[in-house]
Amino acid sequence: MRIRILIAAALTAAALTAALPASALFSDQEESSPAVLDVVKNGMAAQSIDFQSSDFVVEGDGALDAIVITRLPEEGVLTVGGQMVGEGDVIAISAVDGLRFTPAAASEAAESGFRFQPVFADGSQGEETGVELHLLKEANGAPVAENLELTTYKNVAVTDRFSAVDPEGDLLTYRLVKKPARGSVTIGEDGQFVYTPYENKTGKDSFTYIAMDTVGNASDPATVKVKIEKPDTKVTYADLDGHPAHKAAIRLAEEGVFVGECMGGAYIFQPDAAITRSEFVAMAMNAAGVDTLEGVTRTGFADDDSIPTWAKPYVSSALKCGLVQGTADEEGKVVFRAEDSITTAEAAVLLDRVLSVTDVDAQTFAADAPAWAAQSAANLSTCGVLPADAGLTETLTRGEAAELLCAALDLMDSRDTGWF
């Protein structure tokens, strides 16, 4: 590959570059930890697209010194300060603000692109990276990202989702622009992220992110504020490290809603275990502060003998309050089925009754919602208690129940009055 350094002296002050040290051009150093993220930009068809140094984002520790053009666009030309760029040319990062793509006059292409190899300040070269260019026939608006607030506990990671909307409904991806000081953030798929506090850190933290659509439009930065608290409980779980329900499980223990089993001096939560109908009724009522009847020996359900003694006050009280109704068995008798696993749909109906959420358009939830649960699912989804992608026909696990109830507690805390 031929290598040509574009000299700033030959161009105007708005243009580009300065000579680089030989080590930056011919380093045979192994791949280093920093990398440049793929670049995506757009412009109207037949119009040029200008670049800025901020378009070339380094992930990891390292500063970008230059880019080496390894493949030119086929649907147009690259220039720096009016000078044609060729394959193998080196463009210093200080000159990237003068880099421009101009589409060919007769081109009707909707996309173009080129590739480059990054050169870092220590002389190392990163992996070849692509630039994706979208030539639009009509304007495409930038997404809008929302500020978020979340809480967690000391040494407990918390899982959440970024929130943004796009005018055209384009698929969105997310990127950090400012890292937190008291923890780290890992970005997953579908806008999910995990914030992990550093060991024993408490207090306030924050980080900033942007949302990007498929054609390269970026939102204004949005801030996520984090509060790391000391839990008001001595309960810690040996089987929840890194689990999305960890924070919710600690919250339930803190509020006296539910505590897992203690075995060998260690608490376990069993987040993937199925939860029974009687267990969820008790947890939901504890979360809402619903008083239970005393001295209950008969619940009124035909299968009363199969209802555990500890659960009868909860089941009887829930029946009296209208939180549960039971179902008819093959003989037409009304039964509760206390030891059956509860589905997400069944849990949603109960929790919707507990929270007394105002009805919304049921069409806002997934089409697979059972007709009898569609309204409840839509209500809980709208107020942020039930994830929009929840599998309503699936068995609810302890971990999922903890997250539902934690979200319900947050909703109740935000209200001026109680659930009733």
Image (cartoon, rainbow, N blue to C red):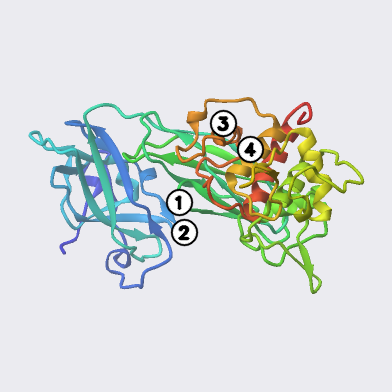
* Circle 2 Cα neighbour tier, 10 Å, few/some/many (<14 / 14–19 / ≥20): few
Q: Is residue 106 visible?
A: yes
Cα separation, mark 3 vs mark 1, equals: 28 Å
Query: Can you identify the residue that label 3 sits on?
Result: 375
Amino acid type of the residue tagged 3 in the rendering:
Gln
Q: Which mark is residue 330?
A: none
Q: What's the residue at 64%, 25% (across, down)?
A: 358
Query: Can you identify the residue that label 1 sits on?
Result: 189
Circle 2 SS class: loop
* Circle 4 Cα neighbour tier, 10 Å, few/some/many (<14 / 14–19 / ≥20): many
Residue 12 pos. (x, y %): 24, 38
Along the horizontal axis of the image, is 257 left or right of 58?
right
Which of discs 1 and 4 lies nearer the camera? The answer is: 4
Q: Earlier in the sequence, mark 3 or mark 4?
A: 4
Cα separation, mark 3 vs mark 4, equals: 8 Å
Amino acid type of the residue tagged 2 in the rendering:
Gly
Query: Can you identify the residue that label 4 sits on?
Result: 349
Q: Earlier in the sequence, mark 3 or mark 1?
A: 1
Amino acid type of the residue tagged 1 in the rendering:
Glu
Circle 3 SS class: helix
